[in-house]
Amino acid sequence: MSFEIALSGINAVNNQLGSISDNISNSGTYGFKSGRVTFASAYAGSQAMGVNANANNQNIGRSGGVVSTGRALDAAIDGRGFFVSKSVAGAMTYSRVGIFNTDKDGYLVDNYGGRMQGYAKSDAGALGAIGDIQIPTGNIPAKPSDSLQYTGNMSSGWAVQTIPFDKGTNQSFNYSNVSNVYDSLGNKHNLTQYFCKTADSTVTVHYVLDGNPLATTTDLKFDTNGKLTAPAATVALNLGSPAGASPLSVAVDYTGTTQFAGEASTSRSASNGYAPGARTGVSLGENGEVIVSYSNDQKMTVAQLAIANFANENALTAGSQTSWQESAGSGAPLFSTAGSSMAGKLATGSLEQSNVDVTAELVSLMTAQRNYQANTKVISAENQAMQALMQAV
């Protein structure tokens, strides 16, 4: 019986050595979770049978360190959760490794070609059903301007203009500002506003598009505290029909404009249009947003990565490529977006390192070596006792 008991100890230590070896070999593997083999005594009734080695159990709940990579499509989960991908074979896999790319068809894929799962985003910002994330590969069309926000200070020290407005004579206005607006073809036009003080509390705005004066004017009226009282709503400004483009009109909003002492200034002058643009890159946001950048300085969120959590994540089945699969013990995945529910936010431009403590593993290795030697000594001693008994007989 001593032979079998010692043999069970050797087999158990062999399993432990396999776990330690796996940990040390993956100490540089992104997203790897260290494992350990635990031992339990084995009995048949009251008879000791040696030791049983329980299966390797990975420490999934312990996060590894985060290393900065600076790459736009790298991400680490700061907290709980797993990235979700559909493998080439069609199986759902779960991983902590956030190394992503785009394939030839525009799909967001993991480092092994599996398609990342997430929520498509509509133009209104609503999240769609979970599925493969496909990134638009074409250009973004032009957006004609239809609003312009202007905020500034009209100096209360301005002199009232007595000369009729003439855009070529700066003595006929007090201040000017140029804003860019875009037509339906994406052509940029210069809209110049000329501010002329016509009374103590009134500033008249004249408009010039690409050097051509418009018939429309707007009176900005202020109270004795320098706050804007009129116009109370946006000003509809018809800019005509640029060559080959649709009619262009913008709603000018002067909210926040003041008439205080001091120099005239402009704090905001922005329209909402833009020229067409080509895709220049893809990046991730901290909440898993998949953001496409274009050459016209526009950014568009096209999808949001799905993050999976499990009621018992330690019961997940480990697989190749530093991934896990759902099991009966883990429960079904609970999907959410990064930063919501139980899911952690993303540390973009970073990767999670292995959580292996190499020093602790080396200490465990030495302990396992001593245990192995002790069990071989038991077998050797039992063998010598058997030889002595045979010789005595």
Image (cartoon, rainbow, N blue to C red):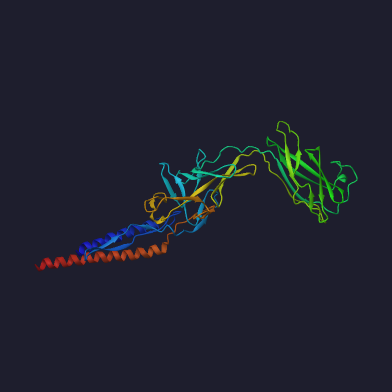
Q: Nearer the viewer, residue 162 or 2?
A: 162
User: Which image quarter holds the N terminus?
Assistant: bottom left
133, above or below 25, in the image: above
255, above or below 387, in the image: above
Outermost residue to the top: 244
**Horizontal and vertical percent for residue 64?**
46, 58
Q: Which residue is rendered at x = 88% and y = 47% of the image?
A: 161
Q: Which residue is rendered at x = 34% and y = 66% of the image?
A: 367
* 70 sits left or right of 310 in the view: right
User: Which image quarter holds the C terminus?
Assistant: bottom left
Q: Nearer the viewer, residue 41 or 3?
A: 41
**Horizontal and vertical percent for residue 154?**
81, 51
Q: Nearer the viewer, residue 379 or 163?
A: 163
Q: Which residue is rendered at x = 68% and y = 38% of the image?
A: 144
* 147 sits left or right of 371 in the view: right
**Horizontal and vertical percent for residue 342?**
49, 55
* 100 sits left or right of 293 in the view: left
Outermost residue to the left: 393
Kindly indicate the quadrant of the structure image that contains residue 388: bottom left
Total number of numbered discs in the rendering: 0
